[in-house]
Image (cartoon, coloured by chain):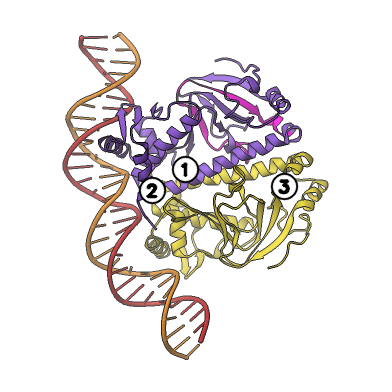
Chain colours: A purple, B yellow, C red, D orange
DNA sequence: AGTTAGATTTGATTCAGGTCAAAATCCTGA
DNA sequence: TCAGGATTTTGACCTGAATCAAATCTAACT
């Protein structure tokens, strides 16, 4: 359970994918001064709980996390998966309370841009504010895509899920074609709005069709184009 | 097609529900200087198109609009409905291009907070920046709710849709129990991921159960509590 | 290595909601 | 006011994916 310790954002290996994208050295310094880095958690530990006071925007440095919200029935819904270099915590921006929980899916480290330094930052580093809005806009575009996806058949949802993981891992410098799912079939199903049996059957089908190779939670993407085609071919409305 | 003309945000009837919530007079003046007000559109006209350059955040003054995105197949998806006092345009924040279109559902007027004055505003009115983030966070919480809802059965989706409309209209000073849908059954179905026939059948069912009264597109909510209960009772996962 | 709880696969069955088709209603413009 | 198109309702039928139920498999811990 390491304590926060100071590390310059400029020296961080994530500097190209995390917040300080296209900022001047001076601006990066301003950010580094206030960013708290970095804390490490084990699988299952919470980055924050639903209802927690908003303490700032977090950035995943390594590992992964899931955003989980509970509905009225107490059912959990996995809203999103966060990979290294991705930001989270925006769900606390509106009313100072987090509207969902963030839970580590494996050993995971992260940084914190504290809430109480944000206003100061808005004034000193306006382009950084712009950058934060950009990220927040990206989140919304992602949400939009998920919303559209939620109306599509099971096959497309799972295909999109795999492609999206692959692309995001690639952008972060990991292999786009081989990766380990940090989610169970149950969790994938929950995230995509499918029964776990459906997830299992479809993974099998994708394998039988030569699109992917499934070894427990290890996925190898064999035919990315064919996988992509699943998103293009079908029709509706 | 009226031209933009200057009206102080402080004098606007929407000032409590739109942006300037809890800002000082001086801060409101700063905003008023840059906000362009107001333009009027007819049903079917675009506030902005998908792919348009981001020109700023818009606020609906009167009327209503829908956010529409096209997927790979060219199918339209109604992502959201915007009512008076609500902000839109956040989908253009991430990459300067709007990722969906905004279309007037009836005669609709709106204001514009121009993009090119935003950075200036970030510096001069930091609490306003905070306010914008708050709004943006609210949008995400809404998206979250919609995402959770998209996994629930048809009945709950429609119930939520009606309740949400009712609550939002109420907050804006309109009747919470009687309102006219500015969407066709087709559009409601599209928005909720249901067939238009299903929407029609469920509206009938709600009426038969004494929850609402349906007269073409006029809805009267008769038993709000019972409608709410639909969201509470059922189980899943 | 053996035990066991959890995760995954596989098969059989069911059902919510989609699709298709047709009738009824509404609405607009001549 | 009427005609014609769009919207909505209603009914019959079908299908994708959920549910239920077992049989495997896996990984962690003695």
Name of the residue lying farthest toward the right: B26
Helix, strand or loop at disc 2? Answer: helix
Residue found 60% across the figure and 53% down from its top: B52
Tag 2 subunit: A
Tag 3 subunit: B
Dot label at residue A72: 1
Tag 1 subunit: A
> In front here: B140 or A28?
A28
Q: Which residues are magenta?
A: A92-119
* Residue that mark 3 sits on: B116
Q: Is residue B76 visible?
A: yes
* Residue that mark 2 sits on: A232
Image height check: is A191 above or below B19? Answer: above
Labels 1, 3: front one: 3
Please rate how many residues cluster around mark 2, counting C-alpha atoms within 10 Å: few if below 14, some from 14 to 19, many from 20.
few
Residue found 39% across the figure and 62% down from its top: B205
């Amino acid at each position: 359970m390491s304590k926060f310790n100071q590390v310059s954002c400029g020296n961080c290996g994530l500097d190209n994918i995390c917040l300080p994208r296209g900022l001047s050295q001076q601006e990066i310094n301003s950010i580094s001064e206030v960013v708290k880095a970095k804390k490490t958690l084990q699988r299952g530990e919470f980055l924050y709980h639903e209802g927690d006071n908003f303490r700032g925007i977090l950035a995943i440095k390594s590992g992964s996390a899931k955003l989980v919200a509970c509905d009225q029935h107490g059912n959990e819904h996995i809203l999103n998966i966060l990979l290294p270099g991705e930001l989270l915590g925006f769900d606390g921006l509106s009313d100072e309370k987090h509207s969902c929980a963030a839970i580590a899916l494996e050993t995971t480290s992260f940084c914190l841009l504290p809430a109480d330094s944000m206003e100061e930052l808005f004034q000193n580093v306006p382009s950084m504010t712009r950058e934060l809005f950009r990220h927040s806009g990206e989140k919304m575009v992602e949400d939009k895509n998920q919303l559209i996806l939620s109306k599509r058949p099971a096959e497309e949802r799972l295909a999109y899920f795999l492609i999206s993981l692959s692309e995001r891992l690639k952008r972060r410098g990991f292999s786009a074609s081989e990766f380990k799912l940090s989610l169970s079939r149950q969790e994938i199903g929950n995230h995509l709005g499918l029964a776990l049996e459906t997830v299992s059957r479809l993974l099998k089908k994708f394998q039988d069709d030569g699109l992917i190779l499934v070894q427990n939670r290890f996925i190898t993407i064999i035919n990315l184009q064919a996988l992509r085609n699943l998103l293009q071919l079908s029709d509706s409305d």
